[in-house]
Structure formats: C-alpha cells, structure tokens
Amino acid sequence: MQSFDTNTLVRNPCVGICCLDESDLCIACKRSGIEIAEWGMYDSSEKKAVLAKIEQRYLEEESKY
C-alpha cells in the first residue's frame, strides 16, 4: 500500500471550463496553456508557485475594474 504525505498534495485549480483567452490564460482557472499541460509533471513546490501566480492574475484582473 502506498502512503501519501498530505503536506505534499496540492489541489488542481481546474474547474472544468477550459478556454484560453488571447493571452493564453484559461478564463476559469487563470493558468497558462503550458501550466495546464505540465501540471501533472510539476512537483508540489512548482504547483504552489503556479497557484501564487494565479492569485496574482486574479488580483491584476480585479484592479482593471
């Protein structure tokens, strides 16, 4: 039986609405096409870095309005 360290599991931000905008960002989860394609290959620190980028992207989008 394989055990998993829950501290290393990072949630996938996908919400099932995959549509890239003109900036190559998903309109739903705010990941880039590359980040979506490579998510499964990222280790937990890389995934956490992507989540931080996503948060920044949402903040930047909100500041436009």
Image: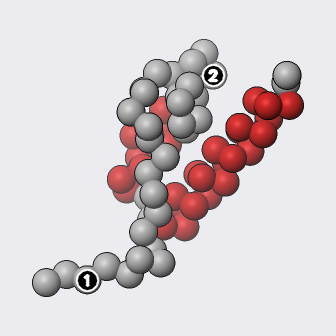
Image quadrant assignment for residue 14: top left
Residue 40 x %, y % = 36, 53
Residue 61 x %, y % = 76, 30
Residue 27 x %, y % = 56, 25
Question: Is 41 left, or right, of 10 in this rendering?
Answer: left
**11, 44: nearer the viewer:** 11
- Relative to residue 35, is residue 61 depicted above or below? above
**Residue found at the far top of this picture:** 22
Question: Is 58 left, or right, of 13 in this rendering?
Answer: right
Name the residue rendered at 79%, 31% in the picture.
62
* Amino acid type for the residue under numbered disc 2: Ser
Kindly tell me whether residue 5 is visible in this rendering.
yes
Name the residue rendered at 39%, 33% in the picture.
16
* Amino acid type for the residue under numbered disc 1: Ser
Q: Which residue is mark 2?
A: 23
Q: Quadrant of the C terminus?
A: top right
Residue 46 x %, y % = 54, 60
Find residue 3 and name its label. Answer: 1
Q: Quadrant of the N terminus?
A: bottom left
The Cα–Cα distance between marks 1 and 2, rounded to whole angstroms, is 39 Å
Disc 1 crowd, CA 10 A, few/some/many (<14, 14-19, 20+): few
Mark 1 / mark 2, whichever is N-terminal:
1
Name the residue rendered at 19%, 81% in the picture.
2
Question: Is 49 left, or right, of 19 in this rendering?
Answer: right
- Relative to residue 12, is residue 4 depicted above or below? below
Kindly tell me whether residue 32 is visible in this rendering.
no
Q: Secondary structure at mark 1?
A: loop
Find residue 60 and name its label. Answer: none
